[in-house]
Image (cartoon, grey):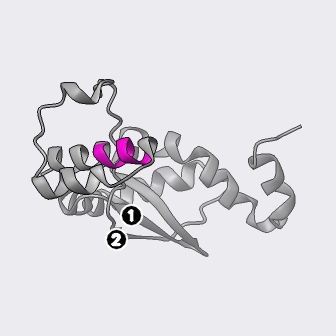
Amino acid sequence: MPAPIKHFLNALLPAQQSWKLTLLQQWHTIMGNLKTHVTLEKINDDTLTLGVFNSSWMQELYLISPIILETINKNLDQPRIKQIRFKQIVQKKKKKIMNNAPSNLKEIDISLTVNEKNALATIQDPELRQSLYKFLVRCQREK
């Protein structure tokens, strides 16, 4: 039966490192509303490296880093973190899913060039031809 990975982490980490697991598990609670602007990137002995998506937020977080440090240490069994470092990271973009994509290709108002029409006409597999047509339409929409 499948089990969450957090059940196995306790067995993998030595007892003196279990505080790191606690920190990972409680990260969203510790950071509260700030969790949308910062991620936990690295735990290195007594130093945390936090990834920040925006340079303005990095400055704000740096200014309140003593408060963040205090909050983190309150949630651990003893004060373990002495320093917080910040680095700017790129936020991963979520893929857009086209829910209302046209089901019938003839309804699309995209005009193909003569070369594109000729190239599609030479493809004998109808599924491949239709897939390539959809790809061309999507490319033209994203321009």
Q: Residues within 10 Å of mark 1 (few under 14, many from 20)?
A: many
Q: Position of residue 132 (x, y in %)?
A: 34, 49
Instruction: Residue under label 2, please give it.
Output: 87
Secondary structure category for the residue under label 1: strand
Q: Main secondary structure of the magenta part?
A: helix
**Closest to the observer: 91 or 43?**
91
Which residue occupies 76% across, 42% down?
A: 4
Give above or below for 4 relative to 58: above
**Closest to the observer: 44 or 129?**
129
User: In the figure, residue 102 lies in which quadrant?
Assistant: top left
- Residue numbers of the magenta segment: 128-133
**Kind of residue sitting beneath label 1:** Gly
Is 100 situated left or right of 15 in this image? left
Q: Residues within 10 Å of mark 2 (few under 14, many from 20)?
A: some
Which residue occupies 10% across, 52% down?
A: 113
> Earlier along the polypeptide chain: callout 2 or callout 1?
1
Is 133 situated left or right of 111 in this image? right
Which residue occupies 51% across, 39% down?
A: 29
Secondary structure category for the residue under label 2: strand
Q: Are marks 2 and 1 in contact (CB under 8 Å)?
A: yes
Instruction: Residue under label 1, please give it.
Output: 51
Is 129 situated left or right of 138 in this image? right
Q: Position of residue 75 (x, y in %)?
A: 59, 48
Q: CA distance from mark 2 to mark 1?
A: 5 Å
